[in-house]
Image (cartoon, grey):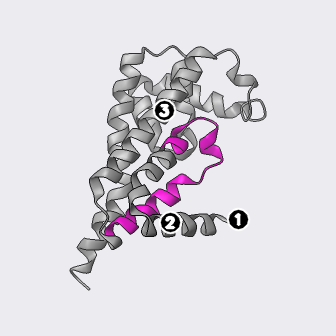
Amino acid sequence: MSINEVIHYVTEFVRQHQAWAAPIVFFLAFGESLAFLSLLLPATVILLGLGALIGEAGIPFWPIFAGAALGGFFGDWLSYWIGAHYSDRVPHIWPFRRHPQMLERGHAFFDRWGMPGAFIGRFFGPLRAVVPLVAGICGMPQRYFQLANASSALVWAFGILAPGAFGIKWLSQFF
């Protein structure tokens, strides 16, 4: 199944079963934020498409936003926990054993930016799932990580859904 077919299938499912929109968005955001799974799940494109569907179909924005923010938060939280608890084993797990440069880039990014890096990392696709893992490996205090995690999850969820949800309504005023 191609990425376009997956996007079409998910958006059509949500269009027909709007009650499932928030749980689906939670799962997609969780998978997009979770180390390892984010490399396999094309959730960003699907979430952007669902944002447009929200605007077009009149699906309430705030429950979907909450699902995305919570999914992103818990995905990063679990990645941090994995890094903190399995720090010595992580380099030997797929995909890092084949691509150790992913962890090296995450370390370099985290070393340079620290807590702000835990916030900023969510907004860069390749770093999104690695930065929380590295924060856990490096022993970043959990309270600082969770502050960056919660605030970035809110901003990210709004940024990924709002352009489609509100942009379509705004543009329809002009056409």
Name the secondary structure under disc 1: loop
In the picture, measured across the screen, residue 8 lies left or right of residue 90, that is left
* Real-space CA distance between mark 2 and mark 1, rounded to the nearest whole angstrom: 16 Å
In the picture, measured across the screen, residue 140 lies left or right of residue 133, that is left
Report the residue marked by disc 2: 13
- Which percent across, then down, holds residue 175? 26, 86
Q: Earlier in the sequence, mark 1 or mark 3?
A: 1
Range of residues picked out in magenta: 30-55
Q: Counting other residues with Cα less than 10 Å from the Cα at mark 2, is it few (<14), some (14-19), or many (20 or more)?
A: some
Location of residue 115 with respect to 72 vertically, above or below: above
Q: Counting other residues with Cα less than 10 Å from the Cα at mark 3, is it few (<14), some (14-19), or many (20 or more)?
A: many
Location of residue 100 with respect to 2 vertically, above or below: above
- Which percent across, then down, holds residue 95? 72, 35
Query: Who's the residue at 69% across and 33% down the image?
Result: 101
- Which percent across, then down, holds residue 125? 53, 46
Any magenta on residue 49? yes
Location of residue 95 with respect to 39 vertically, above or below: above
Q: Which mark is residue 55?
A: none
- Which percent across, then down, holds residue 19? 39, 58
* Real-space CA distance between mark 1 and mark 3, rounded to the nearest whole angstrom: 28 Å
For residue 20, what is the image quadrant?
bottom left
Name the secondary structure under disc 3: helix
Identify which amino acid the numbered label 1 is placed on.
Met
Marks 1 and 3: which is nearer the front? 1
Identify which amino acid the numbered label 3 is placed on.
Asp
Residue 13 visible in the current orientation: yes
Furthest residue toward right: 98
Q: Main secondary structure of the magenta part?
A: helix
Report the residue marked by disc 1: 1
8 vs 168, nearest the viewer: 8
